[in-house]
Image (cartoon, rainbow, N blue to C red):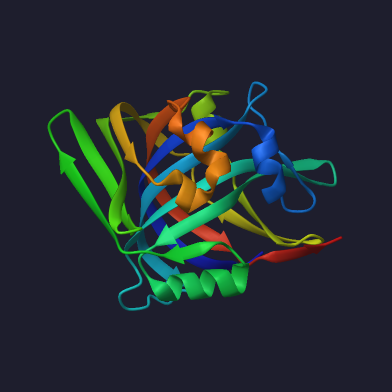
Amino acid sequence: MSNFLSAYWKNLLMLNYKVDAAILKPFLPRGTELDYYNGNCYASLVGFMFLQTRIKGIAFPFHTNFEEVNLRFYVKYKEGNQWKRGVVFVKEIVPRKMICVVANLLYQEHYYYMPMKNSLITTETNFTVQYDWYFNKEWNFLQATASNIAEPMKINSEEEFIAEHYWGYSKLNENTTSEYGVQHEPWKIHTVEAFKVHCNIAELYGSQFVDALSQHPSSAFVAAGSDITVTHRRVLKY
């Protein structure tokens, strides 16, 4: 597949929750299966910076640097004898309307426009990153304080399971699935020392997610990030 988009993703705050498989199955694109880690399904609230964004090599004014917050879960797709490990997005929030139009039109993703802001405060030993989005007349946010030291992920760890998914799948309809690749180097991660979440889960993602996303996350970390590329999509029909 040729590349459609390139960017630099930075400071990916990932809060990861165990979720009942029955909640996720209605969102499954045809041909994919839920991906399990130690017998559990996971969904993640993720906030990060989208930087140096280019579409087909072109940087569009006011659309190169922006925040994104998303809710995603983990799937796999078998092609021949190979399992491809990927993600499905329940909802993706960005502060640029044109990003929503392009992503939803070309990839049939679930992008939504909302006013957003971010902050980054650093000290000698740690940093605090926060991603905010304005929804239902209030500011929601994800916040974490993490160590300045970024270390490689441990092999077969929960963090590696969460981060090492390199495909995106979208449910176009009951018989059609969209597939695209997300290519990047393995990320180093910062250990999270403390975090806060304020999110209207029921109104934003649905009442079925309230219990799972209200519990203490199974893991939390900040991935340092890297250059990434997103390939053109492929349509899988059944």
Residue situated in front as seen by the camera: 17 or 190: 17
For the point 67% across and 30% down, the residue is 36
Image location (x, y in percent) of residue 143: 29, 39
Image position of 226 with respect to 155: above or below: below
Is any part of residue 35 visible from this angle? no
Q: Is residue 217 above or below residue 230?
A: above
Q: Tell me the residue at 35%/58% (across/down).
A: 136
Q: Which quadrant is the N terminus positioned in?
A: bottom right
Q: Position of residue 190 (x, y in %)?
A: 33, 31
Above or below residue 37? Residue 198 is below
Q: Is residue 94 visible?
A: yes
User: Quick one: quadrant of the C terminus?
Assistant: bottom right
Question: Residue 35's spot in the image, x, y percent?
Answer: 68, 35
Residue 43 in the image: state x and y as whole percent: 55, 38
Q: Residue 144, located in which quarter of the rendered image?
A: top left
How many callouts does the rendering have?
A: 0
